[in-house]
Protein backbone atom coordinates (compact mmCIF):
# COMPACT_ATOMS: atom_id res chain seq x y z
CA UNK A 1 0.00 0.00 0.00
CA UNK A 2 2.82 2.38 0.77
CA UNK A 3 4.33 1.72 -2.65
CA UNK A 4 1.04 2.77 -4.22
CA UNK A 5 0.93 5.97 -2.17
CA UNK A 6 4.51 6.92 -3.04
CA UNK A 7 4.07 6.22 -6.75
CA UNK A 8 6.14 3.04 -6.99
CA UNK A 9 4.76 0.30 -9.21
CA UNK A 10 4.36 -3.20 -7.72
CA UNK A 11 7.04 -5.69 -8.71
CA UNK A 12 6.14 -8.64 -10.93
CA UNK A 13 3.22 -9.25 -13.20
CA UNK A 14 -0.27 -9.00 -11.77
CA UNK A 15 -2.32 -12.05 -12.71
CA UNK A 16 -5.85 -11.53 -14.03
CA UNK A 17 -8.76 -13.58 -12.74
CA UNK A 18 -8.87 -15.54 -16.00
CA UNK A 19 -5.15 -16.35 -15.79
CA UNK A 20 -5.50 -17.37 -12.14
CA UNK A 21 -8.47 -19.62 -12.96
CA UNK A 22 -6.72 -21.26 -15.93
CA UNK A 23 -3.52 -21.85 -13.94
CA UNK A 24 -5.37 -23.40 -11.00
CA UNK A 25 -7.46 -25.66 -13.27
CA UNK A 26 -4.28 -26.87 -15.02
CA UNK A 27 -2.56 -27.58 -11.69
CA UNK A 28 -5.59 -29.42 -10.30
CA UNK A 29 -6.04 -31.45 -13.49
CA UNK A 30 -2.35 -32.43 -13.52
CA UNK A 31 -2.54 -33.48 -9.87
CA UNK A 32 -5.64 -35.64 -10.42
CA UNK A 33 -4.18 -37.21 -13.58
CA UNK A 34 -1.08 -38.30 -11.64
CA UNK A 35 -3.13 -40.09 -8.97
CA UNK A 36 -3.60 -43.87 -9.35
CA UNK A 37 -7.00 -43.69 -7.60
CA UNK A 38 -9.09 -40.76 -8.77
CA UNK A 39 -11.27 -38.84 -6.28
CA UNK A 40 -15.04 -38.65 -6.69
CA UNK A 41 -15.98 -35.17 -7.95
CA UNK A 42 -19.33 -33.55 -7.19
CA UNK A 43 -20.55 -30.22 -8.58
CA UNK A 44 -23.42 -28.28 -7.02
CA UNK A 45 -24.77 -25.95 -9.72
CA UNK A 46 -26.93 -24.03 -7.22
CA UNK A 47 -23.98 -22.89 -5.12
CA UNK A 48 -21.20 -23.31 -7.67
CA UNK A 49 -19.13 -25.47 -5.33
CA UNK A 50 -16.98 -28.39 -6.37
CA UNK A 51 -16.26 -31.07 -3.78
CA UNK A 52 -13.84 -33.97 -3.92
CA UNK A 53 -14.08 -37.24 -2.03
CA UNK A 54 -10.51 -38.45 -1.73
CA UNK A 55 -9.67 -42.13 -1.22
CA UNK A 56 -9.05 -43.20 2.37
CA UNK A 57 -5.35 -43.64 1.70
CA UNK A 58 -3.16 -42.22 -1.04
CA UNK A 59 -0.34 -44.21 -2.64
CA UNK A 60 2.45 -42.26 -0.91
CA UNK A 61 0.72 -42.59 2.46
CA UNK A 62 0.60 -46.36 2.07
CA UNK A 63 4.39 -46.40 2.11
CA UNK A 64 4.75 -44.28 5.24
CA UNK A 65 1.80 -45.22 7.43
CA UNK A 66 0.35 -48.47 8.73
CA UNK A 67 -2.60 -49.86 6.80
CA UNK A 68 -5.96 -48.36 7.75
CA UNK A 69 -8.09 -50.39 10.14
CA UNK A 70 -11.24 -51.77 8.53
CA UNK A 71 -14.13 -51.97 11.00
CA UNK A 72 -15.84 -55.02 9.48
CA UNK A 73 -12.69 -57.07 8.94
CA UNK A 74 -12.28 -60.25 11.05
CA UNK A 75 -9.49 -60.29 13.61
CA UNK A 76 -6.28 -61.92 12.33
CA UNK A 77 -5.60 -65.40 13.63
CA UNK A 78 -2.73 -65.95 16.03
CA UNK A 79 0.34 -67.19 14.19
CA UNK A 80 2.75 -69.72 15.58
CA UNK A 81 6.09 -68.24 16.49
CA UNK A 82 8.97 -69.93 14.77
CA UNK A 83 12.60 -68.86 15.15
CA UNK A 84 12.54 -67.38 11.65
CA UNK A 85 9.33 -65.42 12.28
CA UNK A 86 10.60 -64.27 15.66
CA UNK A 87 13.86 -63.02 14.12
CA UNK A 88 11.98 -61.09 11.44
CA UNK A 89 9.43 -59.50 13.78
CA UNK A 90 11.87 -58.85 16.64
CA UNK A 91 15.31 -58.23 15.17
CA UNK A 92 18.26 -58.03 17.53
CA UNK A 93 19.21 -54.49 18.50
CA UNK A 94 22.27 -53.11 16.72
CA UNK A 95 25.57 -53.41 18.54
CA UNK A 96 26.84 -50.23 20.14
CA UNK A 97 29.64 -48.47 18.34
CA UNK A 98 32.85 -48.07 20.35
CA UNK A 99 33.42 -44.50 21.49
CA UNK A 100 35.64 -42.47 19.22
CA UNK A 101 39.03 -41.56 20.58
CA UNK A 102 39.54 -37.88 21.28
CA UNK A 103 41.92 -36.20 18.85
CA UNK A 104 45.39 -35.59 20.27
CA UNK A 105 45.83 -32.23 21.91
CA UNK A 106 48.23 -29.82 20.30
CA UNK A 107 51.37 -29.16 22.32
CA UNK A 108 51.90 -25.49 23.12
CA UNK A 109 55.08 -24.03 21.66
CA UNK A 110 58.04 -24.21 24.03
CA UNK A 111 59.51 -20.95 25.20
CA UNK A 112 63.05 -20.30 24.02
CA UNK A 113 65.67 -20.40 26.81
CA UNK A 114 66.72 -16.95 28.02
CA UNK A 115 69.85 -15.65 26.36
CA UNK A 116 72.80 -15.20 28.66
CA UNK A 117 74.10 -11.69 28.97
CA UNK A 118 77.76 -11.51 27.91
Image (cartoon, grey):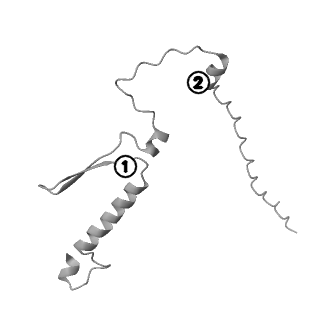
Query: Which residue is denoted by mark 1 in the rendering?
Result: 38
User: Nearest the camera: 73 or 7?
Assistant: 73
Q: Are marks 2 and 1 in contact (CB under 8 Å)?
A: no
- Residue 113: x and y in percent read 83, 60
Corner quadrant of residue 87: top right
- Residue 55: x and y in percent read 35, 42
Real-space CA distance between mark 2 and mark 1, rounded to the nearest whole angstrom: 35 Å
Q: Is residue 74 left or right of residue 103?
A: left
Residue at (29, 69) in percent of width and height:
22
Secondary structure under tag 2 reads: helix
Q: Classify 38 as above or below 83.
A: below
- Residue 12: x and y in percent read 32, 78
Q: Nearer the viewer, mark 2 or mark 1?
A: 1
Corner quadrant of residue 28: bottom left
Residue at (84, 65) in percent of width and height:
115
Choose the circle earlier in sequence order: 2 or 1. 1
Query: Which residue is denoted by mark 2 in the rendering?
Result: 89
Residue at (81, 62) in percent of width and height:
114
Amino acid sequence: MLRYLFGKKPEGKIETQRETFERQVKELTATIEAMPQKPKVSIDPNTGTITFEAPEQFADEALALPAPVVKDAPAPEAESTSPVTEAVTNPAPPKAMPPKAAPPKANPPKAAPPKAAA
